[in-house]
Amino acid sequence: MPLLPVGHRLAYAMLQNAHDAEDAVQEAAFKAWRAADRFRGGSDLRPWFLTIVANECRQRRRNRWWSVSKMADLPEIATPGPDVDADAVELRSALRRLPSNMRLTLMLRYYLDLPFDEIGRMLKCSPQAAKSRTHRALAKLRVEVPRELIS
Amino acid sequence: MNEQEFRTRLRNALGEPPPSDLRRALEARLIAGPSRHRSSVLGPLAATLALLTIAGAVGWRLVYLRTNTPATVKGSIATAAPTVVPTAAAVEPLNCRLPVVITRESGPPGQMVSEPGFVDTRSGQYVKDNSASIAGLPGGAFEGTDVKPFRAAAPAYYSQDVKRWLPVGRDALAPDGLSYLWERLLPQGSNIANFKNVELHRYDLRTATDHLLWTYRGSITIHRWDAAGILVDTMPPPPAGGTMLFWLVDPDSGAVTDQPYVNEHQGPTKLPGEGQNGSFSWSSFGKDAQGRTIYRIGSRQPGDQEWIFYESAPGQRVTIYRGRQGDAAGFDPLRPHGDGRGIWFGDYETHGLWYWDPSSGLHKVPVKGLPPSLTGPNSSLYLEPAGSCM
């Protein structure tokens, strides 16, 4: 599976901004390039690259400029089209309020459709633990949004 | 709601990212990146991009040689609010010798050749510098590298301060031009696939002495060297996953102090109306002699807007070029080199050079006498300014 598109999807899901997502995945690819020859042969490349993408997204969100300026941009950039309902807006907003690791877990599972063993490799835990984390993230999300949205 | 329903709602809420030619953008960004990277970027870049995309699905773009006479580009140049730039040595920019490095590559199988030379900016004639040598100078390539195609240390920058070619780019040079930074992988004999530590060295060109400044477990990337010290970032190898830390290194003692995360993604100050619909696409691809970032708004996609500028102050853009990618001007800038008077650019497509300064605008300098491109698939040739015109 080509990695740039899946990295781009993850970055877009995490950042919810097309330009930032592209920039993040470019930066991640650059870092991957820097580290590619240290990648251990035989390991799975995808979780390794997605980890770099996820870290890049976290770094950007932690950054004060991003959190102040770009978050201020989010409503207009992520303004739903006429065919997107208010529930979608609510869900996006709730996802943004989740802790980064929980949001990442949900994106990996439900946006990228990764299996739990691969999520576990990214989160450095067992597949069972990855599954538990996913359920905890879902539980947290239920607190954030009206129950009927994700009940 | 079951998992599948939640998945559907999540995807409907988030949508899909808009189409993006990431590989092309990466080429632009990485090849236009810091010169320290440039010295060894092409081979591993090609390998990594092939790894991250579908290998061979998108090849390197072929570029074509144009040999015209130097011309001033008019009509599409909108130079605004020129800033005062220091006066460089008394040379006429379009009648001087500009150091350049030509890189030719093709593959697979990977081949890469670089050579230093000079371009007479009046006639556009390129002449290889057959006397160029970096003998006795450390640095310029990772020792024992197993990157394919292999690239040994090679002349990368011509220093007027010491009147010789150096194996590193300007980013690695001291503010006074009399020392430069280089790195060694450890343990001795290791390569970039298995090294454990990196040493950061400062080589004193006046005394021909080398000084070990710092050893770090992971990679070190030099960002800048100014009066405050040497700003670097470090990144441990996977599986740490690319967590970047910033440090300021004292060039004399090697003492390091940690620094806050340096935001390299801030971009230019948005003007009113920009980014309203999320379409504010920018990149940076180098700095001028005063350290001001040179930005591109738009992309290298044909037909996309192309606004090349730097900021003299937040929100104050000094336009170098404003037009459309692929328009008649044909400006498709590669890594810039500011020499205090103006800025030289290579060009992705034309194998030529461009010169810009605030008073006279943008000038095209077609270059002739270049070596032939390598045979083989995906053959490319890049010409980049590698020092100040003299």
Image (cartoon, grey):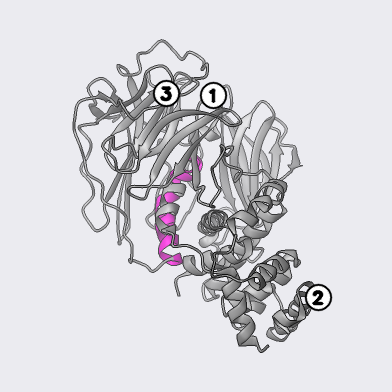
Residue at (37, 55) in percent of width and height = B149
What type is the residue that disc 2 sits on?
Answer: Val
Judging by the rendered image, the residue that carries numbered circle 2 is A143
Residue at (57, 44) in percent of width and height = B183
Query: Which dot, 3 or 1, sits closer to the camera?
Result: 3
Residue at (59, 39) in percent of width and height = B223
Judging by the rendered image, the residue that carries numbered circle 3 is B388
- Chain label for disc 2: A
B234 sits to left or right of B34 = right
Query: How far across and down, in percent of the image, does residue B374 sit?
Result: 23, 49
B57 sits to left or right of A117 = left
- Chain label for disc 1: B
Magenta stretch: helix, strand or loop mostly: helix
Judging by the rendered image, the residue that carries numbered circle 1 is B177
Residue furthest right in the image = A143
- Front in this rendered view, residue B142 or B77: B77
